[in-house]
Image (cartoon, rainbow, N blue to C red):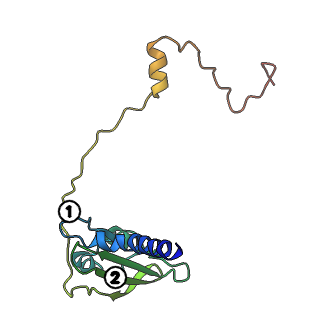
Amino acid sequence: MRKPLFYLSLLTSLTLVSCSTILNNLPGVYTIPVQQGNIIEQSMIDQLRPGMSKRQVLYIMGSPMLDDVFHKNRWDYMFSNHPSGEDRIQQQISLFFDNDQIVGIQGDFRPSAVPVIKSSNESNVDVPKRDLEKTLWEIISGTIGADKTEAKPKPAKNELETDGLPL
């Protein structure tokens, strides 16, 4: 009685363990390609130049994937993509800073020798100046007649008042 129970439990455990392997390799089953990390493109790397500030690099590349506490002057960007049925693609680049300016690039990409100027489609809009004589609350309270208080006159700078009588 013990041998069949042992073989049954062994067969069940092997079947459960192998389910992920079997299900991942079934033909015709769609698996979602998962991209992880920052998408890194050569056009982004071409825009980087020595002497750029961290803020400029942040605008071009986005926030780094790894921000090491022990290496504050090093930003690491990593990209991993595993399309279904294909080999995993991994790319990484490390940017080195000195005095908040980029001094070095290391990784799978190399910047081009010719500076790349990215054109901008942004435009400026002129907004007319607002008339700010009254605040919004003064306008609202003035239209409903709730503003009945009169402003008290300010005393002159050289007059001191004591119980309403000048000294």
Q: How crowded is mark 1: few (under 14 residues within 10 Å), some or many (20 or more)?
A: few
Location of residue 106 with respect to 3 vertically, above or below = below
What residue is disc 1 on? 120
Tell me the quarter of the picture where residue 31 sits: bottom left
Q: Which mark is residue 92?
A: 2
* Mark pair 1, 2: CA separation: 27 Å
Q: Residue furthest front?
A: 1
Residue 149 versus residue 37 in the image, above or below:
above
Q: At 41% from the left edge and 74% from the top edge, which residue is drawn?
A: 11
x, y percent for residue 54: 41, 74
What residue do we see at 21% from left, 81% from top? 115
Left or right of 2? Residue 123 is left
Q: State yes or no: discs 1 and 2 in contact (Cβ < 8 Å).
A: no
Residue 66 on image: x %, y %: 45, 76
For label 1, the SS is loop
Instruction: Determine if residue 56 is in view.
Output: no
Residue 46 % position (x, y):
24, 80
- Check the image and report above or below for 25 versus 50: above
- Between 109 and 159, the residue placed more toward the observer is 109
Residue 58, disc: none
